[in-house]
């Protein structure tokens, strides 16, 4: 639960939904083929397929990177 809260807090700080922050983090990874699988509603699909402003991607990278720095199992 603490790990989840650690990832939700930056999303809240940047006024993003946690899924949006996660997608901004995952999208630039060269090994990620698709960032949105299993949207349950049209609104979720539209949110996940909307383009990411570069500032959002940078915020996501910095926020999640700061949390994951001590995690030996991170994918980078």
Image: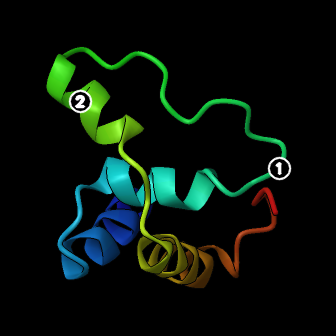
Q: Position of residue 30 (x, y in %)?
A: 83, 49
Q: CA distance from mark 1 to mark 2?
A: 24 Å
Residue 76 shown left or right of residue 7 in the figure: right
**Location of residue 10 with respect to 73 vertically, above or below:** below
Q: Residues within 10 Å of mark 1 (few under 14, many from 20)?
A: few
- Depth order, front residue of 13/44: 44
At horizontal 53% and vertical 80% (from top left) the residue drawn is 58
Q: Which mark is residue 30?
A: 1
**In which quarter of the view is residue 11 placed?**
bottom left
Q: Position of residue 69 (x, y in %)?
A: 69, 81
Q: Secondary structure at mark 1?
A: loop
Q: Residues within 10 Å of mark 2 (few under 14, many from 20)?
A: some
Q: Which mark is residue 44?
A: 2
Q: How many marks?
A: 2
Quarter that holds the C terminus = bottom right
**In which quarter of the view is residue 35 placed?**
top right
At horizontal 35% and vertical 53% (from top left) the residue drawn is 20
Residue contact between numbered discs 1 and 2, judged by CB atoms under 8 Å: no
Q: Position of residue 62 (x, y in %)?
A: 55, 83
Q: Position of residue 47 (x, y in %)?
A: 27, 40
At horizontal 83% and vertical 42% (from top left) the residue drawn is 31
Quarter that holds the N terminus = bottom left
Q: Which mark is residue 43?
A: none
- Depth order, front residue of 49/12: 49
Q: Secondary structure at mark 2?
A: helix
Residue 43 shown left or right of residue 54 in the figure: left
Tell which circle, 1 or 2, labels the residue nearer the N-terminal end. Answer: 1
């Amino acid at each position: 639960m603490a790990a989840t809260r650690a990832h939700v807090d930056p999303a809240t700080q940047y006024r993003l939904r946690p899924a949006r922050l996660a997608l901004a983090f995952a999208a630039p990874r060269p090994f990620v083929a698709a960032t949105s699988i299993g949207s349950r509603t049209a609104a979720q699909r539209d949110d996940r397929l909307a383009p990411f402003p570069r500032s959002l991607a940078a915020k996501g990278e910095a926020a999640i990177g700061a949390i994951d720095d001590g995690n030996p199992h991170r994918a980078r």
